[in-house]
Image (cartoon, rainbow, N blue to C red):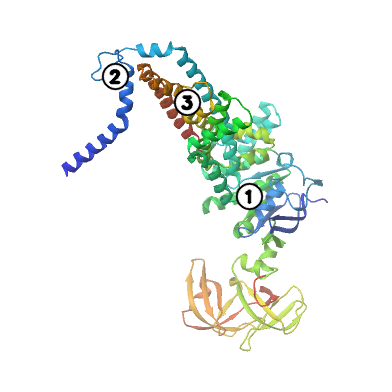
């Protein structure tokens, strides 16, 4: 099956700076893919190359089997939802949404029908005559979405369309956007710097850093099996422990993390004994106990509680290890009762909850 | 406290008097009945207006001035808008500042220098002095001001909407017609009116380039050398009225756009 979008070896340089470095990415039909990364990682540039607003220095963009690399934006089967809507301020909502159809010389009644359909899709029925300049932020993005979808793109591109909205509205729009995408069976490529947004909406996420895709996978794969320290740190919160590899067999690796303590986790491949390794474990996987931990727990690190933050549904507990690393744990309220600051505790986690890579923790 | 307040008022009045007395005097004298310039005036009439408008020299100069104003408005607004657009789209703020500065610099070059340079250049390439040369000069003088106003307008212009039009299937030309033009039209008209006002008022560069063609300011200057003809007051008052209208209109149009 050909991919909906096939990005082949795309590079982009501005002067001597490589904004994109040999990007390869395949997006399947009906798939919701997010490009996620910090600002300046190249995600918007990549999206604009797919839309045709930037040219790549090297590589190809193929959409449903057609090479569109040299096509200008108005001839590409893609449409873009811009960050702040970019509605035509001198037109009303109806004319904004119908613009692409007017360009295609659709007859008036057919345009009206399609616009009404789009307005219903974004739940703005009856607001067609509203002036574009009078809309609220959420309405603007709805109209921008309707305008882009009215053109019947093979692939819809979204450039941080929710970033200007406040949190409540953003969460609501995330759900609506996802429902619309599922309902239409459309292919969406969504650029965001918000990891929660990407996790909540995507079928797959491409994490970008410094012009490269550092990991491409489902939200669960990325959260539970980050391929690098960068991804692990970027997505969600995590604890890092540095150590020396004691053993590594069948992807299960044990580190000596100092003071004779051992920590076990999974690694993508077996590591050589004696090299430096780094372990990442999520706060919600950590158990804190006063008693001895379970026999199958991989690590038993002692710590002293230095911080207890009550957040309602969870309690965040910070403990300092003898090696002077602060380990954060997230516990349910019931599990955190009885903990007080200054208390000596044991920290542990199941081995499959930890990921280990070779390296000394210098940023990759 | 009260004395201070009075003094402040008095000061403001004095400054206003200083600013407007000469203008008021010329407007007043343009309506007097007697050719003698002195107060109190003896009566009001429109005879100097009739006399001015029946003088073929003056009518010719008015005609030339209007042609130059129209050409300046058209050419300077198109060139200046295109330039300001190009500058606003530059990514690097440093290059933007640099090019904008270069576009504005001629506004502070002494008009005398511009006038002489143009005269020398036209002489060198064998252009006979005349209206065409004056038009080139007027456009040059107006351009920095058009660039300045258009740049201020384009600073908050969202270029993403042009991209949106392209993305939805518009060719570059169609996107310009459907989106860019309707949004900047008012600003461009404002800038064009400003250019025509500047052109109507222009003397130095015109004097060096127009040869034996007369514009209103050049003609007035010539008439003044032969003593003050009250018809000059009438011309000045008409010029004043037109300029005030143009500048007001320019402001109104310019302000309405910024999206």
Compared to residue B34, the image places residue A184 above or below, namely: below
In the image: residue B15, left or right of residue B222? left
Residue depicted at x 46% and y 79%: A341
Q: Label 2 vs label 1: CA separation?
A: 72 Å
- In x, y percent, where is residue A323? 57, 84
Q: Is residue A250 left or right of residue A134?
A: right
Q: From where the camera sits, is residue A363 visible?
A: yes
Residue at the disc numbered 1: A159
Q: Chain of mark 1?
A: A
SS at badge 1: strand
Are there few (<14), some (14-19), or many (20+) residues within 10 Å of tag 3?
Answer: many
Badge 2 element: loop
Marks counted in the figure total: 3
The alpha-carbon separation of the residues under discs 3 and 1 comes to: 49 Å
Is the same chain shared between marks 2 and 1?
no
Q: Nearer the observer, disc 3 or disc 1?
A: 3
Residue at 58% x, 77% y is A287
Which of B151 and A103 lies nearest the eye of the viewer?
A: B151
Vertical position of residue B13 compared to residue A56: above or below: above
The residue tagged 2 is: B37
Q: Which residue is rendered at x = 46% and y = 34% of the image?
A: B255
Badge 3 marks a residue whose secondary structure is helix
Mark toward the start of the polypeptide (3 vs 2): 2
Q: Residue at x 52, y 76 (%)?
A: A318
Q: Which of the labelled discs sits on residue B138, or is there none?
A: none
Are both tags, 3 and 1, on one chain?
A: no
- Asked if A104 appears above or below A360 in the picture, the reply is above
Q: Residues within 10 Å of mark 1 (few under 14, many from 20)?
A: many
Query: Which quadrant, please, contains the C terminus of chain A?
Result: bottom right
Q: Chain of mark 3?
A: B
Residue designated by label 3: B200
Q: Is residue A243 above or below residue A63?
A: below
């Amino acid at each position: 099956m050909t991919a909906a979008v096939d990005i082949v070896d795309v590079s982009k340089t501005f002067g001597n700076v490589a904004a994109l470095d040999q990007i390869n990415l395949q997006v399947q039909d009906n798939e919701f893919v997010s490009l996620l990364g910090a600002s300046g990682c190249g995600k918007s540039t990549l999206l604009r190359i797919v839309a045709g607003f930037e040219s790549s220095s090297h590589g190809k963009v193929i959409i449903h089997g057609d090479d569109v690399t040299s096509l200008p934006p108005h001839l590409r089967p893609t449409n873009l939802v811009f960050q702040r809507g970019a509605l035509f301020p001198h037109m009303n909502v109806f004319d904004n949404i119908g613009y692409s159809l007017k360009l295609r010389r659709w007859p008036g009644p057919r345009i009206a029908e399609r616009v009404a359909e789009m307005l219903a899709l974004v739940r703005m029925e009856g607001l067609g005559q509203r002036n574009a300049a009078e809309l609220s932020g959420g309405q603007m993005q709805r109209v921008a979405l309707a305008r882009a979808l009215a053109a019947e793109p093979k692939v819809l591109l979204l450039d941080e369309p929710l970033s200007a909205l406040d949190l409540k509205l953003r969460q609501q729009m995330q759900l609506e956007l996802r429902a619309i995408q599922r309902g239409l069976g459309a292919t969406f490529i969504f650029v965001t710097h918000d990891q929660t947004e990407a996790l909540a909406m995507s079928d797959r996420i491409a994490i970008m850093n410094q012009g490269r895709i550092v990991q491409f996978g489902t939200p669960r794969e990325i959260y539970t099996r980050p391929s690098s320290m960068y991804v692990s740190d970027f997505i969600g919160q995590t604890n890092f422990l540095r150590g020396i590899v004691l053993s590594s067999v069948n992807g299960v690796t044990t580190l000596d993390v100092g003071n004779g303590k051992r920590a076990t986790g999974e690694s993508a491949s077996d590591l050589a004994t004696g090299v430096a390794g780094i372990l990442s474990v999520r706060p919600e996987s950590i158990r804190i106990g006063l008693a001895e931990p379970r026999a199958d727990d991989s690590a038993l690190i002692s710590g002293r509680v230095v911080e207890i933050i009550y957040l309602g549904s969870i309690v965040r507990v910070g403990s300092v290890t003898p090696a002077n690393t602060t380990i954060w744990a997230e516990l349910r309220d019931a599990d955190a009762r009885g903990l007080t600051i200054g208390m000596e505790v044991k920290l542990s986690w199941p081995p499959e909850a930890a990921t280990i890579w070779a390296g000394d923790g210098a940023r990759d | 406290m009260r004395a201070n307040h009075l003094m402040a008022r008095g000061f403001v009045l004095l400054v206003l008097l200083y600013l407007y007395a000469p203008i008021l005097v010329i407007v007043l004298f343009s309506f007097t009945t007697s050719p003698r310039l002195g107060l109190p005036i003896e009566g009001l009439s429109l005879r100097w207006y009739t006399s001015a408008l029946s003088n073929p020299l003056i009518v010719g100069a008015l005609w030339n001035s209007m042609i130059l104003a129209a050409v300046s408005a058209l050419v300077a607004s198109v060139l200046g808008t295109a330039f300001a657009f190009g500058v606003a789209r530059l990514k690097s703020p440093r290059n933007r500042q640099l090019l904008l500065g270069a576009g504005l610099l001629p506004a502070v070059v002494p008009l005398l220098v511009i006038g002489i340079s143009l005269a020398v250049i036209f002489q060198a390439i064998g252009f006979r002095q005349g209206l065409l040369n004056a038009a080139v000069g007027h456009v040059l003088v107006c351009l920095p001001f058009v660039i300045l106003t258009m740049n201020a307008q384009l600073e908050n212009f969202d270029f993403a909407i042009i991209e949106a039009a392209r993305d939805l299937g518009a060719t570059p030309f169609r996107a310009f017609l459907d989106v860019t033009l309707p949004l900047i039209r008012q600003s461009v008209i404002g800038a064009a009116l400003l250019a025509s006002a500047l052109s109507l008022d222009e003397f130095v560069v015109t004097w060096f380039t127009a040869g034996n063609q007369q514009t209103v300011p050049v003609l007035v200057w010539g008439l003044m050398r032969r003593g003050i003809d009250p018809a000059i007051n009438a011309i000045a008052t008409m010029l004043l009225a037109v300029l005030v209208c143009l500048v007001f209109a320019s402001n109104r149009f310019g302000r309405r756009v910024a999206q």
